[in-house]
Image (tube, rainbow, N blue to C red):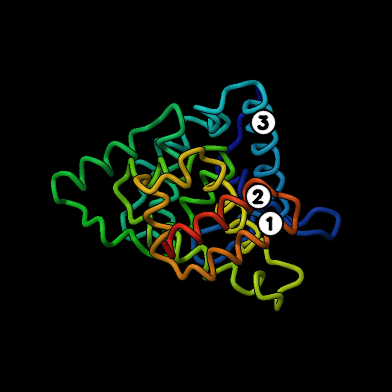
Amino acid sequence: MNHFKISEGFSWATEPVHGASACLEEVENGKFRAFDYLVDFVQAQARSEEDEQREGGKGGLVLTSVPDDVWHTILHNIRPNDPQFLNCVSASAMSPHPGLALMFKNGVKSGVLDISEFNSEGQLFGLAQVCLRAGICVVCQMLTLGLDLTLLVKMLIEIVEPVLDGTDVEPTARRRDAMQVLHSFAEDEHFNDSDAPIFKAIASVDPEKIAAIGAFMTAIGAGEVGRRWERAAEQSIA
């Protein structure tokens, strides 16, 4: 087996190949960033593996494609003020390495962590995206972690408003993700149950916006989901 020094490895990785970008780009002293294509390739490969696991009925632990060392590094280095903290907590809860999720729950319970600091648009939307990619119930994750479900619902509806009013005919990836999360809410058989947490969160929104989501869902062919949103609008008025 051939062995080489780390410095030699970095020298190889930072050298442009055939005039194209190098694998690594130095962004500042001692810090490097992977070429975008490599990141996209690895993420696409991971999503493909996770899709196969979901199709095989393994939806409970879909993040097994993430190496153990990555989870250990995240656990020991990520800080609560990191914009991706809650994203990682949620991912950890759905992986074979739930250490970060347990640390978060214990931190909130003991008062070391202030839950209100995580009820922000960036943190909550990141969590919703992780759940969406993994095929995990967003509402369940929100309730399990003790987060503000009503705030998430209002935030998602605000994100998709340009789609609902027709000003965005080619929705951004962010708006498509938000719409998919809203769609997933109504897939729950308890969506129109007045005692269900998701219905209570929905009922806090302007009924016209709720009805608009229902009309949009129906227009794109999701009739059953659309009817549930329209019924929610009627229930919130009553």
Most foreground residue, 155 or 112 = 155
Look at 44% across and 26% down and name the residue there: 96
Task: Give the residue at mark 3.
Answer: 49
Q: Looking at the picture, does residue 151 appear above or below residue 101? A: below
Which disc, if any, is residue 158?
none
Instruction: Identify the element where label 3 is drawn.
Output: helix
Element marked by disc 1? helix
Q: Nearer the viewer, mark 2 or mark 3?
A: 3
Which sits in the foreground, 200 or 185?
200
Query: x%, y% of residue 227?
Result: 62, 51
- Mark 1–mark 2 CB contact (< 8 Å): yes
CA distance separating discs 1 and 2: 5 Å
On screen, residue 196 versus residue 20, left or right, reads left
| Mark 1 surroundings within 10 Å by alpha-carbon count, few (fewer than 14), some (14 through 19), many (20 or more) | few
Task: Calculate the distance from the C-alpha at mark 2 to the C-alpha at mark 3.
Answer: 15 Å
Looking at the picture, which amino acid does disc 2 mark? Val
Q: Position of residue 177 (x, y in %)?
A: 61, 56
Give the total number of marks visible in the rendering. Answer: 3
Work out which residue is located at the far front of the displayed protein and give it: 238
**Circle 3 or circle 1, nearest the eye:** 3
Residue 39: numbered disc = 2
Name the residue rendered at 56%, 46% in the picture.
Answer: 184
Q: Which residue is mark 1?
A: 36
Q: Counting other residues with Cα less than 10 Å from the Cα at mark 3, is it few (<14), some (14-19), or many (20 or more)?
A: some
